Image (tube, grey):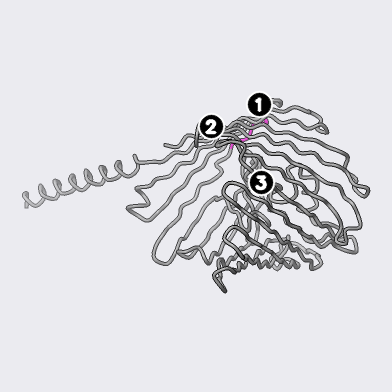
Amino acid sequence: MRVIVICLIIFKCMVFSIEDAIGKYILNDTTNKISIKSRLTYGDKDSTKWQYFSSFNTKLSFPKVKTFFNLSPIFEFGHYTNHMQDASQSKTRLSQSYIDLNNGFGRFSIGEKRLSFESGRFVSDSTFALLPRTFNQLSYASSNNQFQLYYLFSVSLPMSTDRHFFNRGSYIAALNDIYLTRNLSFNFHSYFFEDYNNTYSISAQFTPLFNQTITSTLAYQTDPSIVSAPVSKKSSFFHDIIYENKYNDRSFEIGTRFFQGGNNSQNGFQAPFSSGYSWDGILNIYQPDIKTGFQTHYRSIFGSIQTPLSPSRKLSLDWFLFRDHLLEKNYGAEIDIIIKDSILKDSVFWFYKVGQFIPGTHSSSPSEIKMWLDFVILIDD
């Protein structure tokens, strides 16, 4: 009996030693990605014309946890400061904290996560913001990401620590990369946002030649089917079509997009969780209307040219014309110039952005110019 007890004690010690060794082996192997950003801005219509921001972002992952347990825990911490304001205005947030479970059925995920669909048209993490938009979610994705289903508990607003809760939840469903031919594919998305709207989107991508792409999106929006209070909204449409030609490091793009307006004092098609920089210009002149919906029909015609100036430096020239759907009313125009340069390859960058809004005969917004100068340091271990 004494021998058995001794053997059990020895076995227990061995198990705990092995467990402790495995735990240290797994948890000591972490990957940390750090981003440090300095941003100087100027706006001739802002009350404080010059502002200076800085931000710190770190993303932590555990590769060996994924290897041993098929689990991928991710933690991302963000902090930004406006140095022209009181220090109490600084914002700090655990911007991402989620776990992915990968198995033969696909990927299950739970936690706070960045989300972006359809190039940020209707849902985006607002990448340019110093603190991103994130969603508290429970989701499933097939192994090839062709099918995705999300249940949303809440959303954290960009550049803020505020959170909006969905009392009855919201849903996003996506079916991607449905090929009819080698050159033609379709994506289908459905968005059910509590107290906002239901949006049904279909997008097509056609590649007539290897360096040319034509994409088009058609979306239909109705009253929300998930409500916590009475909501009245007219059905409305959105569509766009974009032609893009890429050759080596150069690209040319031209397109148009249309938002149907409302009637009887109701707003039309809205995209409350989209990124301002996914739409019409870096000045975001009409972004408030895009989020809440236009009362009249709105169309933009836009183009972009991107070309390298040197092996490390790239130039983008973007232009936008803001009109009504019949091109009879002139709501203004915008021209943006963006320069990106690498000081140390894959480690240190700077960006310069300048945008000029030119008012039209039917626009209420005055002429405006804004500039951004960013310095970014990336540290990846």
Q: Is residue 207 magenta?
A: no
Task: Give the x, y percent position of residue 240.
Answer: 73, 61
Task: Give the x, y percent position of residue 333.
Answer: 83, 46
Q: Earlier in the sequence, mark 3 or mark 2?
A: 3
- For this view, does 328 lie left or right of residue 255? right
Along the line of sight, the residue nearer the viewer: 66 or 44: 44
Residue at the image position 23 percent from the left and 45 percent from the top: 16
Q: CA distance from mark 3 to mark 2?
A: 28 Å
Residue at the image position 56 percent from the left and 66 percent from the top: 176
Along the line of sight, the residue nearer the viewer: 285 or 300: 300
The numbered mark at residue 374 is none
Q: CA distance from mark 1 to mark 2?
A: 27 Å
Instruction: Give the residue type at disc 1.
Output: Ala
Along the line of sight, the residue nearer the viewer: 227 or 320: 320
Which residue corresponds to mark 1? 87
Q: Considering the numbered disc 2 on the image, is that residue within a helix, a strand or a loop?
A: strand
Residue at the image position 55 percent from the left and 71 percent from the top: 179
Q: Which residues are magenta?
A: 88-92
Q: Is residue 89 magenta?
A: yes
**Pair 1/2: label in front:** 2
Which residue corresponds to mark 2? 348
Instruction: Give the residue type at disc 3.
Output: Leu
Q: Residues within 10 Å of mark 2 (few under 14, many from 20)?
A: some
Q: Considering the numbered disc 3 on the image, is that residue within a helix, a strand or a loop?
A: loop
Which residue corresponds to mark 3? 157
Instruction: Give the residue type at disc 2.
Output: Val
